[in-house]
Image (cartoon, rainbow, N blue to C red):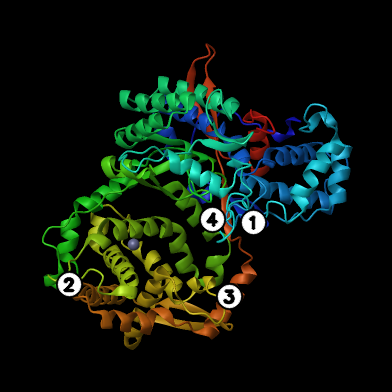
Amino acid sequence: MTAILTACSAEKATTPKIDDFKYSVDKFADIEILRYRVPDFENLSLKQKELVYYLNQAALEGRDILYDQNNKYNLCIRRTLEAIYLNYPEDKNSPDFQRMTTYLKRVWMGNGIHHHYSEDKFVPEFSEKFFMDAVRSIDPATLPLLPGERPNDLINKLLPIIFDPTIYPKRTNQADGVDLIQTSGNNFYSGVTQKEMEDFYAKMKNPKDSTPVSFGLNSKLVKDKGNLIEETYKVGGLYSAAIVKIVGWLEKAAAVAENEKQKEVINTLIEFYRTGDLKTYDKYSIKWVEDLASDVDFVNGFTETYGDPLGMKGSWESIVDFKNTEATKRTEIISSNAQWFEDHSPIDPKFKKEKVKGVSAKVITVTMLAGDCYPATPIGINLPNSNWIRHEYGSKSVTIENITEAYDQASLGNGFTEEFMWSDVERERAKKFASMTNNLHTDLHECLGHGSGKLLPGVDPDALKAYGSTIEEARADLFGLYYMGDPKIVELGLLPDKEAYKAEYYSYIMNGLMTQLTRIEPGKNIEEAHMRNRQLIAAWVYEKGKANNVIEMKKRDGKTYVIVNDYVKLRQLFGQLLSEIQKIKSTGDMEGAKKLVESYGVKVDQTLLTEVLERYKKLNLAPYRGFVNPVYKLVKNSKGEITDVSISYDENYVNQNLRYSKEYSSLPTFN
Ligand code: ZN
């Protein structure tokens, strides 16, 4: 039984170097599982590390809540399959056992029996007979049996849920014209019709209330003897056992908070978990959004409402993070030099802003992903969701750089660059610089690009109509591209090397001319605005640079490649196009916008598309990715005092999920 725990010595925390780090850990069905690094964790103070540790623990304790919210049989199915996985007495290499293992991995990925993205129920590839035999073959004490229940009862209960495709086919149904509650597989409502639910909440809402709470966010709506009641998620209410544990860790976290304000944030969240009072939740959200001084930060609670077809019930999620000081410095440098960039931009002076203000974004490093952020996670967060709080108190918008790093680095090792890049020169440069240049390009795009330039007086901001968003994205992208190659960038310390920008130039052109086509179906053209913008830019500079051989499309062994021959001229072309696009935007030149987008951004060379799709298919890449978390441990001296928190990265996907199910699983099988 101890085989599921990786031995992990209490070594000193160190962040492995990018080069030595193996990002990809597992692959099954349509999923690849990655690891992520936590750079600079070792540089936090001991108290901050402790705080992170307790918040991490609070994050992990909520895992079962989400399983139960997603479907009421999820915990029972997960526990049954895990029992089989651990205790199956026969051949674990048999095809049926392997297929069941894949199914279990998918259940962990989806936090239940539905796909995390499509929300369709998984189709098991192992047989019903295998499932029945396996359940009967193991010690009943290891199965999640209810009092008086026998293995055969469990089998009868679960067979249709796992194998019948007509039962709970979809987790969240958004289809028009049916009862969205009764046709959704999730567990936010019980015995309630959509009409009853809508009437129930309509009665609660007061149109004159300018500060309404998020009705229904933290409860299950249940019909009991003809009456509708909310079973609130709180200490002493629904999911109490897990919430009690969460609160216990939050109390420890509050005791080592970085400052009074943060302590209040945590204590208000504790009060909310104790009372279930949504007014208290709003108080907490306001304190949370106002806490900008702390380095360590977290999300913990019933947060996003995408899981409810009617957008009211909050799925439980948590992340823990700390400020990425280096990267945040980067966005602050960019933002504080906004006027210099505006003044030196290669556009007509009459379209420039006399006074420009950059936006600086906070960049964070996550230490733990949990609940609805695990294993699949967003790469940025913008909270809280309450509209009036956003309006009156603002919101926190962050990007998670250690996750984007993992995505970028994993992509470098998966055969993609080997297949599509021209030579080792481009591949080496990408390995060294792609992650940082990609982040910098995003920063320049977001912090400066969209905010630069101005419309001439009287020009309607919507003058470019359907072409508006493609032109606007192209403008922001070009602003970033143009400046990435500027010596000023190295001078400001934003890139370490004057060659680094070439990594972004090459990948941008390769993507725009060729590899983004992997997302287009045969026979189709490009419709999405960002994709149009990228092809527009790449195709335009390709054509305009032809006379000077700036970019080439070359064939080798029947395969097409992109080669950039002259990066300096390429930068000038980016500047020229920026100037043209700014003119279109500033003057509201609809015809100019249309001509540019239609000539360069839309049409797809179908022969090239077929070639790219074939090459891509052979790489056998997983369309979706999830993560495993690092493992944190308290390090204590002989007197039992905490002296450090260690971090290790060697736990694999299976062991991690089995360990979570063992150590952080306090809820009953049915709630
Ligand atoms: Zn944009």
> Going by the image, does 458 lie left or right of 202?
left
Residue 613 numbered tag: 3
User: Which label number is shown at residue 459?
Assistant: 2
Q: Secondary structure at mark 2?
A: loop
Q: CA distance from mark 3 to mark 4?
A: 21 Å
Mark 1 is on which residue type? Asp
Q: Sequence order check: which comes first, mark 3 or mark 4? A: 4
Instruction: Give 359 or 107, whichever is nearer the viewer.
Output: 107
Disc 2 marks which amino acid? Val
Q: Residue at x 27, y 62 (%)?
A: 450
Task: For label 1, count other residues whose C-alpha is less than 10 Å away and answer few (under 14), some (14-19) or many (20+).
Answer: some
Q: Residue at x 45, y 73 (%)?
A: 510
List the residue tagged with mark 1.
Answer: 120
- Callout 3 environment at 10 Å: few (<14), some (14 to 19), or many (20+)? some
> What percent of the width, then of the height, locates residue 89?
87, 39
> Residues under labels 3 and 2: Cα distance?
42 Å
Amino acid marked by disc 3: Leu
Residue assigned mark 4? 410
Give the secondary structure at mark 1. loop
Q: Quadrant of ligand 1?
A: bottom left
Residue 515 shows in this picture: yes
Q: Are marks 3 and 2 in contact (CB under 8 Å)?
A: no
In the rendered image, the residue lying farthest to the bottom is 547
- Image coordinates of residue 444 in percent, x first then y, are 29, 59
The response on whether ligand 1 sits within 8 Å of label 1 is no
Q: Nearer the viewer, mark 3 or mark 2?
A: 2
Please identify the quadrant where the N terminus is shown.
top right
Foreground tag (3 vs 4): 3
What secondary structure is found at the residue carrying circle 4? helix
Q: Are circles 3 and 1 on residues that touch, CB within 8 Å? A: no
Question: Between marks 4 and 1, how big is the CA–CA gap?
Answer: 27 Å
